[in-house]
């Protein structure tokens, strides 16, 4: 196929889109957090006889779903921004609802809000659940009758619940101050261990390699987000991630058993394993996990060596983040898809006489992923989950209608189930999200079950069909250009790393920075190529160039590791003897 030939046929998975995966290691954290955030405000309103206001407190409470993968210093900021974003979208929706009852205008406002929320969440990588919760709240409140005088009070309720959600999200910090960093480090070590075991090559090895690079990159992002003043524990975790990077660059020299042992020891609140000097020679004695030679610690072991291997981390912390506008620009096609798909879905729903067009709007908004193929998979998952979910709603409605307290308890159960199951597959979580959304509509007063179920099924089908059609219609030709730019970035990083490795006078900091830069470029290339591969209506991608660039980069990474002398010791280390105090 020539490079000028557009690719117009893609396989659209159905069964594969519904396949269940393994649950997240911390699936219970967001599930328990959302229950703890929703329950007190809702139960207080039950006691006051004002459950009709629970929709506004729930807007703030649902912010507790965010930030569970962030270190606590970063989580505090992320949660604050999410709460402000929730209040901003809610304010626009409430003001619009108070100024007009024109359904077409309200759908248009909801579609524009959804596009902005999608773009900002993708650019800042806020999620999961990213923009979907924000869009659900703002779209639903667009169709709740309001007056301008009521807006400040409703916003105050959401803000108070949001403050409580912030406290819930930060509550584990005193007990497990480094929990997110520990989990990310353990996941990186385990992923590299899997790759080291499958490093013989082939498709399985390539998949494991990509997963390992992504896990190591995610671990670095987590550790770097912890702040510019790393504690003793974070430095120990950084050294473990360095070992994971080293094993990733030279898998033949890695010891998977040791990596798994380190991963197991990192979890929990125990002591962080001390790695020692990876360049140590066989037979060099250890004392407290630190290699010692005659004459005491020097550049081959001890404090000097530890400072050398973390020099690249310090350099990366000093780099300013990219401005938001530069991260928003590549997301323009996705934002247009979201605005167009949500607006059309809402208009079609209105044309068919629906009372709640925001259901179709939210369904469309939930579909949009990195490319068309993934968007199709999400559409399948959404439809299946919602269809099963309405059956669950019909089954629990008699219990929910026993009284306000029963309704709140059913909402809490659905919140917990959604977050507990959504990690296995999106459709499984939607089975609980659907009755949750339907139960929320009954907070102001009970409504006919049959009508709710029928409207939800029709709006789900409309939103999925129209939303996916918009994704196909709005092409993303920038995807191919981003692959070319990622290839150029990898080539430049590889050439730079090769020059630094060949320079006898290169400092440890320069070697580490060059290796880290090349590793990050490889991760970005693979993510960009995977995203572009699922797009339609574009020129054929340079897949062969991508594979060759990755192979060359991996060889350069291995050479850089050997130039640094960061080869793992093939011997066995007992993690219970090499430890470091994990106190902050």
Image (spheres, rainbow, N blue to C red):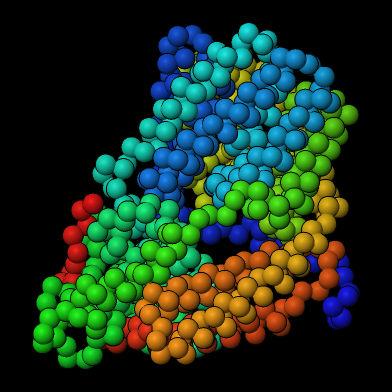
Q: Is residue 340 above or below residue 359?
A: below
- Residue 94, percent from left and from top: 66, 20
Q: Who's the residue at 43% across and 76% down the image?
A: 510
Res. 392 in view: no
Is 413 positioned to the left or the right of 430 in the image?
A: left
Q: Residue at x 57, y 73 (%)?
A: 522
Position of the N terminus, as image quadrant, is bottom right
Q: Position of residue 15 (x, y in %)?
A: 68, 60
Q: Is residue 549 above or below residue 354?
A: below
Can I make out residue 115 in this image? Answer: yes
Total labels drawn: 0
Residue 27, image x, y percentages:
44, 49
Quadrant hosting residue 533: bottom right
Image position of 144 with respect to 433: above or below: above
Left or right of 430: which side holds 317?
Answer: left
Question: Which percent across, then down, holds residue 100?
Answer: 78, 16
């Amino acid at each position: 196929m020539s490079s000028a030939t557009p690719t117009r046929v893609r396989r659209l998975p159905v069964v594969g889109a519904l396949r269940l995966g393994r649950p997240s290691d911390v699936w219970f954290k967001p599930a328990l957090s959302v229950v703890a955030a929703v329950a007190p405000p809702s139960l207080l309103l039950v006691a006051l006889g004002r459950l009709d206001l629970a929709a506004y407190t729930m807007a703030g409470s649902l912010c507790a779903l965010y930030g569970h993968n962030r270190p606590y210093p970063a989580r505090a900021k992320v949660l604050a921004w999410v709460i402000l974003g929730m209040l901003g979208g809610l304010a626009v929706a409430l003001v619009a609802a108070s100024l007009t009852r024109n359904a077409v205008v309200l759908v248009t406002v909801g579609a524009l809000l959804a596009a902005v929320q999608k773009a900002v969440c993708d650019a800042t990588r806020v999620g999961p659940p990213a923009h979907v919760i924000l869009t659900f709240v703002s779209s639903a409140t667009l169709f709740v009758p309001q007056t301008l005088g009521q807006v400040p009070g409703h916003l105050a309720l959401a803000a108070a619940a949001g403050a409580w959600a912030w406290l819930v999200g930060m509550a584990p910090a005193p007990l497990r101050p480094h929990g997110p960093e520990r989990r990310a480090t353990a996941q990186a070590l385990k992923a590299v261990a899997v790759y080291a075991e499958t490093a013989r090559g082939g498709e399985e090895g390539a998949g494991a390699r990509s997963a390992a690079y992504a896990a190591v990159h995610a671990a670095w992002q987590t550790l770097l987000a912890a702040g510019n003043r790393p504690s003793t524990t974070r430095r120990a975790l950084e050294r473990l991630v360095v070992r994971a990077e080293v094993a990733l660059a030279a898998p033949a020299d890695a010891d998977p058993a040791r990596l798994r042992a380190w991963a197991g020891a990192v979890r929990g609140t125990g002591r962080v394993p001390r790695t020692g000097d990876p360049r140590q020679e066989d037979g060099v004695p250890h004392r407290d996990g630190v290699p010692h030679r005659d004459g005491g610690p020097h550049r081959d072991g001890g404090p000097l060596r530890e400072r050398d291997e973390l020099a690249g981390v310090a350099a990366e912390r000093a780099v300013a983040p990219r401005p938001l506008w530069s991260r928003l620009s590549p997301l323009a096609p996705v934002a247009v898809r979201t605005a167009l798909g949500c607006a059309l879905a809402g208009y079609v729903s209105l044309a068919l006489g629906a009372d709640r067009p925001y259901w179709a709007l939210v369904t469309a908004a939930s579909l949009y992923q990195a490319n068309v193929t993934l968007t199709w998979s999400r559409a399948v998952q959404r439809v299946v989950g919602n269809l099963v979910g309405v059956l669950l709603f019909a089954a629990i409605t008699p219990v929910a209608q026993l009284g306000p307290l029963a309704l709140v308890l059913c909402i809490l159960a659905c919140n917990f189930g959604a977050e507990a199951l959504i990690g296995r597959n999106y459709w499984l979580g939607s089975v609980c999200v659907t009755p949750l959304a339907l139960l929320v509509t009954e907070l102001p007063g009970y409504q006919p079950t049959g009508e709710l179920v029928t409207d939800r099924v029709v709006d789900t089908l409309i939103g999925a069909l129209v939303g996916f059609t918009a994704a196909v219609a709005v092409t993303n030709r920038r995807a191919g250009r981003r692959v070319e730019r990622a290839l150029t970035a990898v080539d430049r990083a590889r050439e730079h790393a090769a020059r630094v490795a060949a320079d006898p006078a290169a400092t440890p900091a320069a070697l580490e920075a060059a290796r880290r830069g090349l590793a990050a470029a490889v991760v970005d290339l693979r993510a960009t190529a995977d995203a572009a591969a699922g797009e339609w209506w574009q020129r054929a991608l340079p897949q062969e160039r991508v594979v060759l660039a990755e192979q060359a980069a991996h060889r350069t990474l291995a050479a850089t590791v050997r130039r640094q002398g960061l080869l793992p010791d093939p011997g066995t280390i007992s993690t219970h003897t090499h430890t470091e105090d994990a106190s902050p």
